[in-house]
Image (cartoon, rainbow, N blue to C red):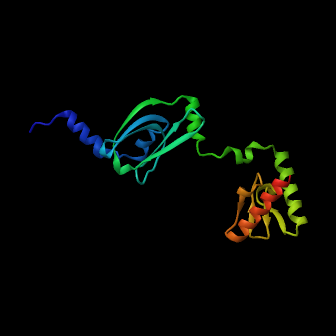
Amino acid sequence: MDTDPVTQEQNNSLTSWIDKTPLEWQGYVNKEVTVTADEKNEYQGWVVTIDPVSASIVLVNFEEDQKTSVCIVMGHAVQKVEVLKESDEVTKQKLINIFNLQENSSSNYSKEDLETKKLNLKSWLMQNNIPVAEQGESDRTICVAGVLTIDPPYGPENCNSTNEIILSRVQGLIQGYLTSQ
């Protein structure tokens, strides 16, 4: 029986992607790769993550106009993954922060700014006869009528409630309040 070692290696790579362990997949994260999928489709980009259940690869490409494109290659379709290069520190930071919504983060505000925003919003809600209380870590969270919470930085997108009607109405009120500021 004569087996070609290259063919043997190709067969191993064809069947082994989905059988790799999460630790092995982790070795591809933050690297630029070319993925060959079913029907010889090729995808190139930076690996952000790999789903440990489906073996799907999330690829990102940074475009020149500050936009980012995301492509997901389904794990069952992956035939070959070729590493092109390692990421430098700048690219690694971009990949780490790619899904963070920095503009809505409370870390962009000083403690004093957050306290002022909280007090102003709380005062405005109370003036409009909406029952509010403070709760949570260092009273950072505003609780509205016991059914809705507003976390820093106290915008409409920071509201949480299981009651969608109240959630929608309070978000609308806060948006109106912020627009009038």
Residue at x-position 43% and y-position 47%: 22
Q: Does 91 sit above or below residue 176?
A: above
In the image, 124 versus 172, the foreground residue is: 172
Residue 21, image x, y percentages? 39, 47
Give the image location of residue 177, x and y in percent.
Answer: 83, 58
Total numbered circles: 0
Q: Position of residue 114 (x, y in %)?
A: 82, 49
In the rendered image, the vertical position of residue 85 relative to residue 13, given as above or below: above
Residue at 75 percent across and 42 percent down: it is 108
Residue 125 location, quadrant: bottom right
Report which quarter residue 166 is drawn in. Answer: bottom right
* Residue sitting at x 79%, y 63%: 173
Residue 178 image offset from top left, x and y in percent: 81, 54
136 relative to 128 in the view: left or right: left
Residue at the far left: name it.
1
Decide if residue 122 is on the left or right side of residue 159. right
83 relative position to 140: left or right:
left
Residue 22 as seen in the image, left or right of residue 148: left
Q: Quadrant of the N terminus?
A: top left
**Quadrant location of residue 160?**
bottom right
